[in-house]
Image (cartoon, rainbow, N blue to C red):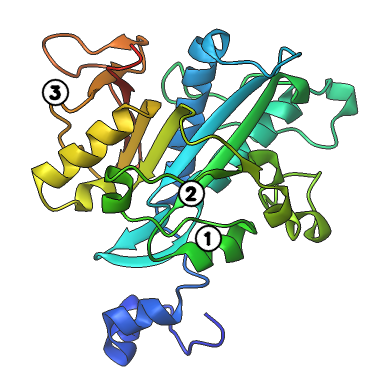
Amino acid sequence: MSGTGSSRSMRENYNTHGVENYYNLVSSTYRNPHFIPVKHCLFDWMNAWWTNECHNLDTEEGSDRKTVKIFDLACGLYLLKLPFHSGEVTESIASWLDTARRNSIPQSAKVQDALPVKRRIPWQQSPPPIPFEDLSLLSCAADPYTAAAYKSRLNFSCAELSFQDVADGALPLKFLEISLVNNPTADSLDDSTSTKNEDLGIMIQSDEILDMVVCSFALHLIETPSQLFSLLWELSQKARWLVVIAPHKKPEIKDGWGWVQWNIGQWELCGSRGPGLGSEILQDRVHLRAFKSVNFC
């Protein structure tokens, strides 16, 4: 990467700079090597969730427009327990929304076709058509290490909250209309728009219910079951859905911790025999699991 003296050989980079120092050098430009499968997993999840839950969503006062609040928890990338550049989840969901809106435009009016997601199983497909007036996605983010990197990438603030802060009841209260995220696939965005995102943040009440919490490549790093329980129980009282993305099926979320695993393929609670076919979305060894809060079932 220019300016860092780094090589295409990761072994050479490690030998020259040391592992931790190398990632500190490239933290402003580093991208999760799993970003594409993470993005595909989120496309598939958002497709299934919107198709099955859109009729249950709150609408804005005086209109039929659905408003959805999403919390990108621990939005920084963690590899070898080191924090790096952040915002992959928010950017992926922004891309999903942009593609859905493109799909709602008549073919004759499109500048170019939206790119479909690679298909493997029935719910993996390009987003359904969602006209602009049908859906408003609001997003907030938190990470104790990568707030500056998140703002650099997406031109919006990230709360410097740790897992423990969230377990103690803290949440970001400033949300961004996710269509304003600096997404290179969105025709409606340019530099002059994205630099103003900070001024366009929407404040919500502290007691408002979140529609979804997404935690990517981070939840399994919580060291003790008691810490994990405290976080999950607190979130279960504030959010309807929890989406966990990881390179494996960890952490184990136990009964009594505020969440029940959801079968995405069947769109129902996982049976008494445990997770089965359709209980996760898998893309190139990236696993996405979904859980529903027991307080909102």
Query: Spatial distance from mark 2 to mark 1, Cα to Cα?
Result: 9 Å
In the image, 215 versus 257, the foreground residue is 257
Q: CA distance from mark 3 to mark 1?
A: 33 Å
Answer left or right for 24 relative to 2. Answer: left
Dot 2 and dot 1 residues touching (CB under 8 Å):
yes
- Classify residue 131 by image quadrant: top right
Q: Position of residue 254 (x, y in %)?
A: 13, 28
Mark linked to residue 256: 3
Three-letter amino acid code of the residue under disc 3: Gly
Q: Between tags 2 and 1, which lies in front?
A: 2
Going by the image, does 181 lie left or right of 228?
right
Q: What residue is rendered at 37% in x and 76% in y?
A: 23
Residue 150 circle label: 1
Res. 269 image quadrant: top left
Q: Amino acid at mark 1?
A: Tyr
> CB atoms at circles 2 and 3 under 8 Å apart?
no
Chain-order first, disc 3 or disc 1: 1
Relative image position of residue 141 (x, y in whole percent):
48, 49
Q: Residue at label 2?
A: 141
Label annotation for residue 108:
none
Number of callouts in the render? 3
Quarter holding the C terminus is top left
Of mark 2 and mark 1, the one earlier in the sequence is 2
Give above or below for 232 relative to 218.
Answer: above
- Disc 3 crowd rating (10 Å Cα; few below 14, some 14-19, many 20+) is few
**Residue at (38% x, 58% y) in the render:** 77
Position of residue 216 relative to residue 83, above or below, is: above
Q: Earlier in the sequence, mark 2 or mark 3?
A: 2
Helix, strand or loop for disc 3: loop
